[in-house]
Amino acid sequence: MPSASESKGASARSTRSDAVRNRQVLLDAAAEVFVASGVDAPIREIAARAGVGTGTVYRHFPTRADLVVAVYRHQVEACAEAGPALLADSASPFAALRAWTGLFVDFLVTKHGLADAMRADSGGFEALHAYFLDRLVPVCAQLLDAAADAGEIGPGTRAYELMRGIGNLCAGSDDDSRYDPRRLVGLLLQGLRQAE
């Protein structure tokens, strides 16, 4: 039979793991809502999608900016972690690059509206942008290098330029239902492939 201190330790670990799980559910739900409705979507919509009350959202994220930043960081990490996994699991390095750019586009669509949400904290926005570049440029470079080494694309494509180009193709997509940046990103990737 466990001692009282062992039971308290197990209970605290269980509570911490529940809190981490709740936070992840909230971040995933917020990301989905932000894609569908923008970063100004009502907190109650995020809470409903996560299956929690609004108090739970505010307990984890006291301000909308806190939530937006947390979603941003969460998605940067997911995108960064996906690169090596896709490279290991895909049929080819180019297939991994194509899948990763799809995730990157999804991330960029969620990112729209971040600047407005963080308007009061320009230093915070700059720090997030630096974090974004520090985490994602090396992942994109790894995918490009692998595709070039496999002879699937020509050498010399720089990760920052590709990411910037994709970002530019995604700009304004939330304002025009007739425009789907994914199609143009696909054409951009075809162009890399033709550079063999």
Image: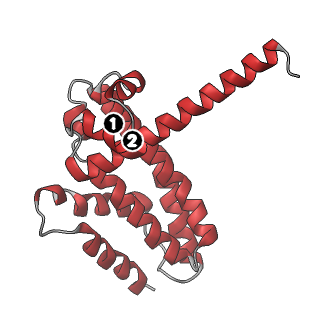
Q: CA distance from mark 1 to mark 2?
A: 5 Å
- Dot 1 corresponds to which residue? 47
For numbered disc 2, what is the local secondary structure?
A: helix
Q: Residue 74 placed where, x, y %?
A: 45, 42
43, 3: nearer the viewer: 3
Classify mark 1: residues with Cα within 10 Å, few (<14), some (14-19) or many (20+): many
62, 13: nearer the viewer: 13
Q: Residue 49 placed where, x, y %?
A: 34, 44
Residue 83 visible somewhere in the drawing: yes
- The residue drawn where x is 21% and y is 40% is 41
Q: Amino acid at mark 2?
A: Ala
Q: Which color scheme does this rendered protein use?
A: secondary structure
For numbered disc 1, what is the local secondary structure?
A: helix
- Dot 2 corresponds to which residue? 50
Q: Is residue 14 above or below residue 135?
A: above
Q: Is residue 130 above or below residue 155?
A: above
- The residue drawn where x is 49% and y is 50% is 78
Specify the farthest residue to the top. Answer: 4
Q: Residue 36 placed where, x, y %?
A: 24, 52
Q: Residue 185 placed where, x, y %?
A: 30, 71
Q: How many marks?
A: 2
73, 141: nearer the viewer: 73
- Quarter of the image containing the N terminus? top right
Name which quarter of the figure residue 93 lies in: bottom right
Residues at discs 1 and 2 in contact (Cβ within 8 Å): yes
Name which quarter of the figure residue 69 lies in: top left
Left or right of 173? Residue 54 is right
Q: Amino acid at mark 1?
A: Ala
Which numbered disc covers residue 151? none
